[in-house]
Amino acid sequence: MENERKKSAKERYDERTARRVCLKLNKNTDADILQKLESVSSMQGYIKTLIRADIAANVPVRPAD
């Protein structure tokens, strides 16, 4: 197509390696969450840290053989 532009190297890389996840928060009922997210230097980093901590805390312990 004439209007279709060539994808940049970054776009091709992101297409292969990344996935976008969106989160919809209500300004009224989720105001506390929004306030916290706005106070951190990296929203993405903060959310990833919380998820990884949750994963680590919920790893099932295997019984000893």
Image: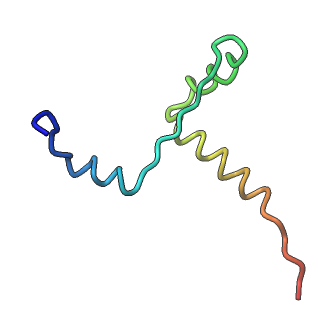
| Residue 50 x %, y % | 66, 44
Quarter-of-image position of residue 38: top right
If the image is split into quadrants, where does the C terminus sit? Answer: bottom right
Give whichever of 62, 36 is nearer the camera.
62
User: 52 or 25, which is in the foreground?
Assistant: 25
Q: Position of residue 27 (x, y in %)?
A: 63, 13
Relative side of 33 to 57, left or right? left
Indicate left or right for 10 with 4 as reference.
right
Please state which of residues 50 and 2 is positioned toward the viewer in this rendering.
Answer: 2
Give coordinates of residue 3: x percent, y percent.
13, 33
Q: Give the quadrant of the N terminus.
A: top left
Residue at image position (67%, 16%) is 31
Image quadrant assignment for residue 59 = bottom right
Q: Residue at x 21, y 52 (%)?
A: 9
Residue found farthest to the top: 28
Q: Is residue 8 above or below residue 56?
A: above
Q: Nearer the viewer, residue 63 or 46?
A: 63
Q: Position of residue 25 (x, y in %)?
A: 62, 22
- Which residue appears at 56% of the width and 30% of the height? 40
Number of numbered markers: 0
| Residue under the image location 50 percent in, 32 percent down | 41
Image side of residue 11 versus residue 37, left or right: left
Relative height, residue 26 to residue 56 (above, below): above
